[in-house]
Amino acid sequence: MIRFLLCGMSRLIMAVLLLGLGVCALEVGLRAWQLRQRIAATTANESIELTVPSASSWIDVKPLVQIQRAAENGETIRIRTNEAGLRGPSVVVPKPRGVFRILVLGGDSVFGSETDNDHTVPARLSHHLSRNSSQAFDVVNAGCPGAGPLINLLRFRHQLATTQPDLVLLCLAQSDLMSDQPCRGALRLDDARQPAYAAHPRLSAQGYDIPDAVCCEFLTVDYLTRKLGSVAGFDRAAVPRPISSRSPASLAPVVPLQQLVTASFGQLLISIAPSNSLLGAEPQKQPSDLEADLKALLQKTELDQLIPVQNALSDFLSTSDPRSLFYNDSGKLNARGNDLYAQSLARFVLQAMQGPPATLAQPPAQVPSGNSGVPAPIPFSAPAPSDPWPANASPQLLNRQSR
């Protein structure tokens, strides 16, 4: 009897030891995999490695990032942010005399997580503006992966207005509207019923979250809870549902953003970023739903004469192979696509600075590429001068329901 108990006890101890060794091996393997991912900087979600939770704007770009990662085409790209979380060098404040500063807002289409510092849309926009104007320009890349119009509105209100921009260029993509969905539940309004702030739950939670701390310390626990939650369907509520531009809350932040930009003595321009999804078997030549809904909102709020709207899709459709300007897997613009979009934006900006739209030089039927893989510049046509923007404009407030 005693021998039987000892034999059973030894087998139990052996099983526990084997289980412990297996858990330790899994933990070591997960930590080695995580270390490899961090070294290569190739995590699947760029928003996780490039953004941090914010107490005022839900998320923001992580400051002082210096990483190298492999792009979708296999090339090594460099990503560097300054102390304010803006991609590029530090912004000089106060703004130097004689410099026209352009703040480019948007999601990853502006930040450019798949392109090098010198080939992002704002970097190429600065290049083309300098080539086609004697004005000194300072183009600031204020893109934020995973940020939509609402998050960018809060970022401008709390941080970016201090950069003293003369012009704010908001680049909107259909996918950006979905990015604002998690932020809306935390949105708080000010006394004027305008968006004030949205604190990320990681920064607003009270006390010490023991389960979250355990998951952070032990990758095995985090891995198992995520897998079991996926199998049981616990994470279904976290999957964002598609957001239409016709949703009242999706494009509404454009109105208070116009008010903030005007109060900062600047002008707001909006561009519809080209999307690979619109390049089907028969490319869409009519205005996209996003563009039509945006213009309808501006007309309803009496801002259609104050906020110029541009859609660069026509420039892409004029090329011989529009799909070659996007990455195959992610659908994001590659270096050649960024340059073509920047050329379209440069014409748009120069016209907005000088007057109403004039006849533009159309892009060539084929986008030639040089040794650097960047298309040749598209010629600009000089817009006709006209009256400046109305100084006595009073945008109508857009009422929002408090939560």
Image (cartoon, rainbow, N blue to C red):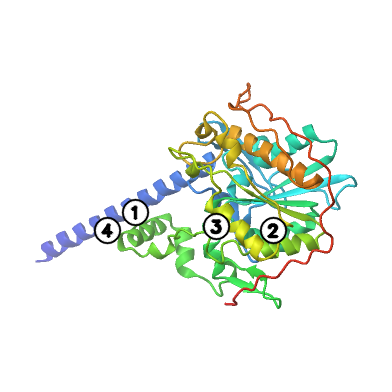
Residue occupying the point 71% across, 69% down: 396
User: Which label's residue is closer to the chain start, 2 or 1?
Assistant: 1
Residue 158, relative to residue 81: is it above or below? Answer: below
Task: Tell me residue 333's x, y (percent).
Answer: 56, 39
User: Which label's residue is closer to the chain start, 2 or 3?
Assistant: 3
Name the secondary structure under disc 2. loop
- Classify the position of the C terminus by image quarter: bottom right
Name the secondary structure under disc 1. helix
**Identity, as a three-letter code, of the amino acid under mark 4:** Val
Could you say which disc has been placed on residue 177 in the image?
3
Tag 4 residue? 16
User: Which label's residue is closer to the chain start, 2 or 4?
Assistant: 4
Tag 1 residue? 23
Asked whether residue 12 appears in the rendered view, the answer is yes
**233 horizontally vs 107: left or right:** left
- Classify the position of the N terminus by image quarter: bottom left
Residue 208, relative to residue 273: is it above or below? Answer: below
Residue occupying the point 61% across, 68% down: 199
**Identity, as a three-letter code, of the amino acid under mark 1:** Val
Residue 165, relative to residue 341: is it above or below? Answer: below
